[in-house]
Image (cartoon, helix red, strand yellow):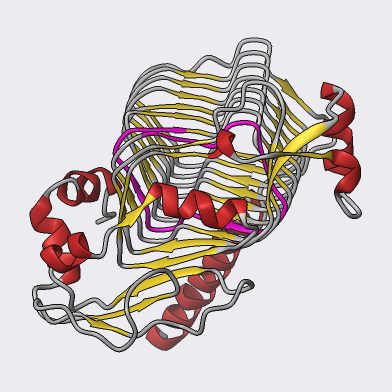
Amino acid sequence: MMVIPYNALMRLSTQRRFLGRFGLTTCVLVTAATSPLGTASPAGCVVEPTTPDAQVPFTRHLDTGCSEAEREAYAVRAEELLAALKEGKGVDLAGVVVVGDLLLNELPLVSVDSLQDPPPELQAAFGRQALNEVRVISGPISIRDSRVRGMISAKVKEGLLIIQGPVTMTGTTFERAVDLSHTAFLGPVDFSGSVFLSEGFFIQTLFLQPARFQNTAFGTHTRFHKATFADTVTFLRSGFNGLAEFLEVMFEQDASFSRTYFKMGAGFSGSRFHRMVDFSEATFEREAFFAFTVFEGDAYFRRSTFRALANFSDAEFQGVDDFSKVLFDTKPNFVRTKVSASRRTPGGLQSPVFFYAIAGAVVIVMAVFVLALRKGSQ
C-alpha cells in the first residue's frame, strides 16, 4: 500500500513527532556562530565550534540525540541567518530549530552588471522586467532535518532574488509560509522529505538546475504559477494536501509526478511539457484541470486515479498519450483535445503490439500442446 504523505504531515505537525525524531538524550553541537569553545551545557550538549573564517558558512549542527529543550537552548534566530547572508556567507544547519521570520527582501540590492556570466535564462529575465538591480545570495543554503517556525519570504513582487549556490532543505518542517516567488535558483534545489504545514509559493520562480521535491508533503496551498523548470524536476511520491496550482508552468526537461497524491484540486492548465511527463499511479481526489496543456513529449497517466472530474479540454498530445488502466470515477472531459496523427503508441509492457505478440505466442503454445496430447493418445 502506498504511504500517503498527508498522514506524515499530520504526524509531523505534533510535538510528539518532533521529539521522536530527535530523541531525548545528549547531542553534539557544531557552530561557527557564538558558542564558547569546548563548553557543554548543563543539559549535556557539547559545543564544538568550527574555526572562525569569513569564508565558512554559518554552521550549526545538532546530533539526532538532542532533546527538544537542548534544541530550544541553541535555537537559530532568523536575524543571525540574514546577517550571514548579507556578509556573503552560506548557511549550513542540521537538526536545529529556527525562530523568527527570514525576510529576504532585506538583503541589499546589487547591480546586474556586477554579476559574472549570468546564464541566458537569467539575462532574459532581466530584459523582460527591465531590471537594473537584484538581490543576491551567493553562498549555498542547507537546512536539513530541522524545524523552521517562522516564515521564509523573498517578498518580491517586482524584481528578482538570485540564489547562486545549491539549496538543500531535506527533511525539514516549515510551520509557516514559504514564499520564494520571483526567485532564480542557479544551482540544484532539493526539498525532498520536507513538510510544509502552511503555504508554499514559487510563483514565477526559475529553476535552472535539477529540482527535487520527492516524498514532500505540501500544506494548505501550493503555487508554482508561471514557474520555469529548465532542468529535470521530480515530485515522486509527494502529497499535496491543499490546492495545487501548476498553471502556465514551463517544464523544459523530464518531469515526474508518479505516485503523487492530490487531496484537493489540481491545476495544470496552460502548462507546457517539452519532454516526458509521468503521472503514472498518481491519485487525484478532487478536480484535475489540464485544459490547454501541451504535451510535446510522452505523457504517461497509466494506473492513475481520478476521483472527480478530469478536464483535458483543448489539451494537445504530440507524443505518446498513455491512459492505460486509468480509473475515472467521473466521465472525463476531452472536448477539443488534439492528438498528433504521427504519435507513437505506448511501448514496452504497455504496448498493444506486445500484448498481441504474447497472445499469439500463447495460441501457438496451446496448439502445440494439443497436438502433443493427441499424438500421445494414439
Please provide percent x and percent y for residue 368: 53, 76
Q: Name which residue lies at 59% across and 28% down.
A: 203
Q: Quadrant of residue 334?
A: top right
Q: Name which residue lies at 39% across and 22% down.
A: 265
Q: Quadrant of residue 283?
A: top left
Q: Quadrant of residue 133?
A: top right
Q: Give 251 or 350, whichever is nearer the viewer.
A: 251
Q: Please tell me whether residue 375 is drawn above or below residue 149 in the rendered image.
A: below
Left or right? Give the position of 321 relative to 319.
Answer: left
Q: Give 213 or 205, whichever is nearer the viewer.
A: 205
The answer to whether residue 269 is visible is yes
Please provide percent x and percent y for residue 60: 39, 70
Please provide percent x and percent y for residue 195: 33, 48
Q: Which residues are magenta?
A: 177-200
| Residue 192 belongs to the span the image colors magenta | yes
Image quadrant containing the C terminus: bottom left
| Residue 62 belongs to the span the image colors magenta | no
Please provide percent x and percent y for residue 87: 62, 57
